[in-house]
């Protein structure tokens, strides 16, 4: 009987140790975000590649007070200028558009532009 009670005690002790044992997260993982870096949009400044000509995508930026679309390989001249006025947008959106928002495909580009139209 003492062996059974001792065995149950050991099992309970092990369960408690594993429950309360602190587990260290691997903060180096690319999928971990902290509250300061949680963003659904990749900023233009995040594109620190040596050769952008190998990247496909678009940059959405403020251009003369309007939302404009630039090809990732030509940020000097917009490929499309919308009729959406930046001045009417919230301050956070103005800041995003000042830096530039990266869209990796036409689908993502259209989705972002639709968000600003509504």
Image (cartoon, rainbow, N blue to C red):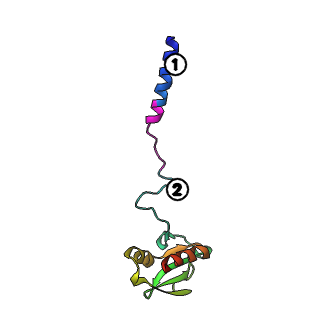
Tell me: residue 38, above or below residue 94: above
Viewer-nearest of labels 1 and 2?
Answer: 1
Left/right placement of residue 53 relative to residue 29 reads right
The residue located at (42%, 75%) in the rendering is 93
Figure check: 7 above or below 58: above
Residue 21 % position (x, y): 44, 36
- Element marked by disc 1: helix
Q: CA distance from mark 1 to mark 2?
A: 41 Å
- Residue 21 sits above or below residue 96 on the image: above
Residue 107 lies left or right of residue 20; in this view the side is: right
Instruction: Give the quadrant of residue 85.
Output: bottom left
The residue identified by callout 1 is: 7
Magenta range? 16-26
Residue 9 appears anywhere in the view: yes
Along the line of sight, the residue nearer the viewer: 94 or 2: 2
Q: Tell me the residue that label 2 is attached to.
A: 31
**Residue 86 sits in quarter:** bottom left
Q: Secondary structure at mark 2?
A: loop
- Please say whether residue 85 is one of the residues in the magenta stretch: no
């Amino acid at each position: 009987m003492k062996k059974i009670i001792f065995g149950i005690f050991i099992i309970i002790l092990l369960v408690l140790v594993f429950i309360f044992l602190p587990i260290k997260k691997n903060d180096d993982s690319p999928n971990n975000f902290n509250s300061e870096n949680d963003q659904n949009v990749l900023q233009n400044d995040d594109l620190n590649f040596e050769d952008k000509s190998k990247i496909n995508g678009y940059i959405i930026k403020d251009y003369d007070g309007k939302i404009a679309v630039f090809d990732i390989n030509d940020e000097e001249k917009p490929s499309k200028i919308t009729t959406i006025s930046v001045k009417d947008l919230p301050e956070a959106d103005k800041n995003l558009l000042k830096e530039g928002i990266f869209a990796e495909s036409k689908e993502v580009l259209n989705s972002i532009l639709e968000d600003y139209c509504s």
